[in-house]
Image: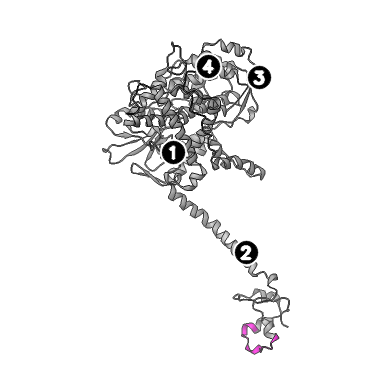
Amino acid sequence: PGPSRDRLRYGDVPPHLCAHGSDLGELSFEEKWLRDADMDGLRESVVYEPRAVFRDDLHKHPCSPRSAFLAKAATFCCCGACLCPLLLYLFIVTLTNFSVYGTTFTYSGYLKPVWSYLLAGMADNVTLAQWYARIAVTGNASVGKGPGSNTQMYFGWHEVRALLADFYPRIRNQSMKRYSEMGVSVQNKLMWPDTGTIMMGYTQKAHAVVRPVLASVLDKALQPRQECDGSACWNGAWLRGVFKARFAQTEVLSNRDLVWIVSSVLHKVLLNLDLSDDDARNFSRFLPAFAFPQPLPPVMAASPLAGWLFDIHGVLEVKAWLVKEYRRAIRKKWQFVDWDIRHDDLVLLANAMVDSLTLAGGLTVPSALDHMLALLFMQDSPAAKIRPADLQKQAVLHDFIMEALRLFPPVAGVPRWVTDDGGNTWAHQILNVGQALQDPSIFPQPHEFRPGRPGLNHADMNRSIGWADFALVGEDVAHPDSHACPGKLLSLQLMSAFLSEFVQAGPWQADDPAGISLNMYASSGYTLRKQRQSQRGSQAATDHEGFRLANKSSGLKPNGPLPAAPVPPLFRFCNWLPSLCRFVSIPIQCIEAPCGFA
């Protein structure tokens, strides 16, 4: 018997052959055999070549044009899923390669290690220490290889100290120079259209112009016995008055407030520029938008996609406004300098002020305070033995600050390039002052919080290295060839004054102590509330001499409100993504953490 007419299979004789009386003798042997086969199972097991089948009911057939289109689409999607990651990888590799002083930085040799470093720091200090152990060279746990094929990183205290002290001799014999770098990452030039580099990468000639000026308003402007208001000099009394006034009006404090509060003080000290609270808050929102695109490789940063994701045009517009305002403030503060003749120096100095207020003290001091407040209020804190009230004792306060800075250093690397063959080749070195503070040979049990460590306490600071302390020339912070932080004293006294007046204005309580956590870069966030209105009140605050000076308006006002800080599309995506992923129950720690870092 022939096949059922309502069950036509490949290899069956089409019905129209029989309908027109076709002679079976004209069929091939295979067609005759398939025509007469009795067993369906046998027929279905035959190996054959597919051939076209024509039917009237095409809409019912699984190989209809419509379903064939879907099959093709599925095939393209499947192939795309395999090829797209490869193409994306090749695209990334192409965009991420760049060269510095004859050394090529690649995706695998530089960008991947930097990304893994970032993620390790987002975990905790132990995970970061493990990252350093993995890059350590064989036989020397104090020296690491990379990131970068021509990079050596030093993280032993003695090694870092020796290399910091080596700055001045190498500067003199011209065997050292610096590049646009911050920490362990190379910065692109796109974010510095005026100078082509962050201030840490200035040439020695440009550095010699800027360094004495910055030092003159930072540590050189400390006058403990004078009446200061921040315009020409500063001291601890003035700083305490500023924060006393601030906390007298503050009932709720969050970690997000720290940047704008500190920025307001630093603008006064550096430029005698009086920012309103609204302008200071807007400035704090500008900081991440300015900082986040900087480590992108040059070609990637210049791409239209990066320009859109990070709104680089909008960010640079705000920066240009700041540079213009800072130039005006510099002319006013140093009015006896002929800046028309020294126009290039004015451009260098104004851009250095932007970097100082956004990346140096403007970023590191709030980061340090963020860690300190979290240590005071988090549940199961490493610093649980110290309570806020204990900080009213200056010795305890100082030791707490120094140990918090040691355990959670806001500065990691001090990079440089050196040559030993007259400049034919240059080697990249990163002096990791942050990891030097974790050296177990100098600081036993380095992952434990132990205030008052030898050489890092209120009576003895000879092991302090986090400010690149040993890169001074003759202990002169203003020397043109000094490369230690020019604001060490200011940063210490600012943090001390902040915490002292914060404690005095309390007591405070965290909304959710169990929800506070720390990584190497920041806290998870917190909100602190004043538990009662201070009995000292505003009347006592107004009796404080520092309060009077803090409210004495003697500075320059910005020429109009600060432009609104741009919110790049990537930041909007980061804000939106966690909620979406939580809604669909997808764990997103690996995505949420980098967004949080931004």
Residue 412 showing in the rendered view? no
Neighbor class of circle 4 (other Cα within 10 Å; few <14, some 14-19, many 20+) is: few
| Front in this rendered view, residue 221 or 451 | 221
Q: Residue at x 59, y 30 (%)?
A: 525
Q: Is residue 86 left or right of residue 341?
A: right
Q: Report the span colored magenta.
A: 19-31
User: Which comes before the other along the chain, label 4 or label 2?
Assistant: 2
User: Which comes before the other along the chain, label 2 or label 3?
Assistant: 2
Q: Which residue is mark 2?
A: 70
Q: Residue at x 48, y 28 (%)?
A: 559
Residue 197 showing in the rendered view? yes
User: Which comes before the other along the chain, label 1 or label 2?
Assistant: 2
Residue type at tag 3: Gln
Q: Which residue is mark 4?
A: 551
Q: Point out which mark residue 412 bears.
A: none
* x, y percent for residue 220: 39, 19
Q: Which residue is mark 3?
A: 531
* x, y percent for residue 563: 51, 33
Q: Point out which mark residue 191 bears.
A: 1
Residue 50 inside the magenta-drawn segment: no
Q: Secondary structure at mark 1?
A: loop
Neighbor class of circle 2 (other Cα within 10 Å; few <14, some 14-19, many 20+) is: few
| Front in this rendered view, residue 194 or 430 | 194
